[in-house]
Image (cartoon, rainbow, N blue to C red):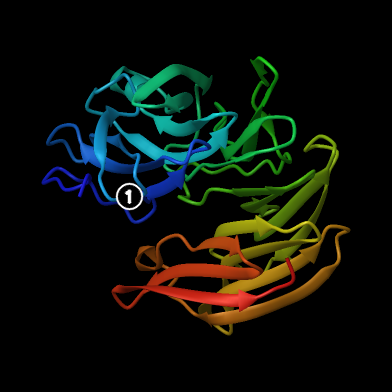
């Protein structure tokens, strides 16, 4: 396997991935240690041109191999290539250095056009990205000098990137990383972002969506304010938005699912199963395929997979 290595780094919140590029090639990413220091790791990229039968390592995603953290990658199709977003800690090797959000293009065996999108972000909250009708868009947990850790986004329009801006100004003052990133999904002109946040000392899972407009001009609805753990995962169809998260029910952490129509009506909100609220449950993930909603989560030392028939 391309990822076979005695230097691989395992992190319950920073998960490897595989994605198909517009050309049909497969790309995979995983974490590898850069040095023997506890959190010195980087992102390796592999490529397959024959449907996964054979893989070739194309090296590091980033042009830095300092003994710092690099991870929490999102890979998406972008025109005729792939685009990567990740958290990059190279500046943290310096006094008062900060974690940054970076992006680069993957094309063939090359990684090019690496650049910084935000030079001060939360250190270990997963990122999420999607191709919108306007261009690629990434959402992530930001970090202000005052330790406000709201969800922000950056959007590429034509040849320029927007300045980082909040999805919604929640003003969550948090002196440490909550390891709880947002999730973004799109279908046509419908774009949806789910996030875990704290507003007026109340933990919430919130869904925000917009059609042919800006994020700030969108609408939003609270899906859960009963002390949820969060770790949202969202997908869209042309008419509905589906969000999975870890919630709380009668002192038991559970996996929850909500369906919200594109007009903002909660069509369904249900509990799927009990789940551990700690790191052992990992990060639930969702995928829409063939009119079915697929959901994965961790528990009891195994990966669980469920599916629900929906109207696509």
Q: Nearer the viewer, residue 182 or 156?
A: 156
Asked which secondary structure carries label 1, the reply is: loop
* Number of other residues with Cα within 10 Å of mark 1, as a class: few under 14, some 14 to 19, many 20 or more: some
**Residue 42 place in picture, x, y as percent:** 28, 34
The residue closer to the viewer here, 284 or 49, is 49
Point out the residue furthest to the front here.
Answer: 50
Using the image, determine if residue 306 lies above or below residue 227: below
Q: Where does residue 190 sit, x and y in percent of width and height?
A: 78, 48
Residue 7 picture location, percent across and down: 14, 42
* Residue 47, visible in the rendered structure: yes
Residue situated furthest right in the rendering: 263
Viewed as shown, does residue 29 lie left or right of 102? Answer: left
Quadrant the C terminus occupies:
bottom right
Name which residue lies at 22% across and 39% down. 32
Q: Is residue 186 left or right of residue 59?
A: right
Q: From the image, tell me which residue sits under label 1.
A: 52
Q: Residue most toward the bottom?
A: 250
Of residue 249 and residue 78, the one placed in the foreground of this image is 78
Camera-side residue: 32 or 310?
Answer: 310
User: Picture coordinates of residue 96 (x, y %)?
Assistant: 38, 20
Query: Which quarter of the figure has residue 100?
Result: top left
Q: Is residue 142 visible?
A: no
Residue 241: quarter of image: bottom right
Q: Is residue 2 above or below residue 84?
A: below
Give the residue drawn at x 25%, y 37%: 56
Image point (62%, 41%), residue name:
151
Q: Is residue 191 left or right of residue 59?
A: right
Residue for point 42% across, 18% down: 112
């Amino acid at each position: 396997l391309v990822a076979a290595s005695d230097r691989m780094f395992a992190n319950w919140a920073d998960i490897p991935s595989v994605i198909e590029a517009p050309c049909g090639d497969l790309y995979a990413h995983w974490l590898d240690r850069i040095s023997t220091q506890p959190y010195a790791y980087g992102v390796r990229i592999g490529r397959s041109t024959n449907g996964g039968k054979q893989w070739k390592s194309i090296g590091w995603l980033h042009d830095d191999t300092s003994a710092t953290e690099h991870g929490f990658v999102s890979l998406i199709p972008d025109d005729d290539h792939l685009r990567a977003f990740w958290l990059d800690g190279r500046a943290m090797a310096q006094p008062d250095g900060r974690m940054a959000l970076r992006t680069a293009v993957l094309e063939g065996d090359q990684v090019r056009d690496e650049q910084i999108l935000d030079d001060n972000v939360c250190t270990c909250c997963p990122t999420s990205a999607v191709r919108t009708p306007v261009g690629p868009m990434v959402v992530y947990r930001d970090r202000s000098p005052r330790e406000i850790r709201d969800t922000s986004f950056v959007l590429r329009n034509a040849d320029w990137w927007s300045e980082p801006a909040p999805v919604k100004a929640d003003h969550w003052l948090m002196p440490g990383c909550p390891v709880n990133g947002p999730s973004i999904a799109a279908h046509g002109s419908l774009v949806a972002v789910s996030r875990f946040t704290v507003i007026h000392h109340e933990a919430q899972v919130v869904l925000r969506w917009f059609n042919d407009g800006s994020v700030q001009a969108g609408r939003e609805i609270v899906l859960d304010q009963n002390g949820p753990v969060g770790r949202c995962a969202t997908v869209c169809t042309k008419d509905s938005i589906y969000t999975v998260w870890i919630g709380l029910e009668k002192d038991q952490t559970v996996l929850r699912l909500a369906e919200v129509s594109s007009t903002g009506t909660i069509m369904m909100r249900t509990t799927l199963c009990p789940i551990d609220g700690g790191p052992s449950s990992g990060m639930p993930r969702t995928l829409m395929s063939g009119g079915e909603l697929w959901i994965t989560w961790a528990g009891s030392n195994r990966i669980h997979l469920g599916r629900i028939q929906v109207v696509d």
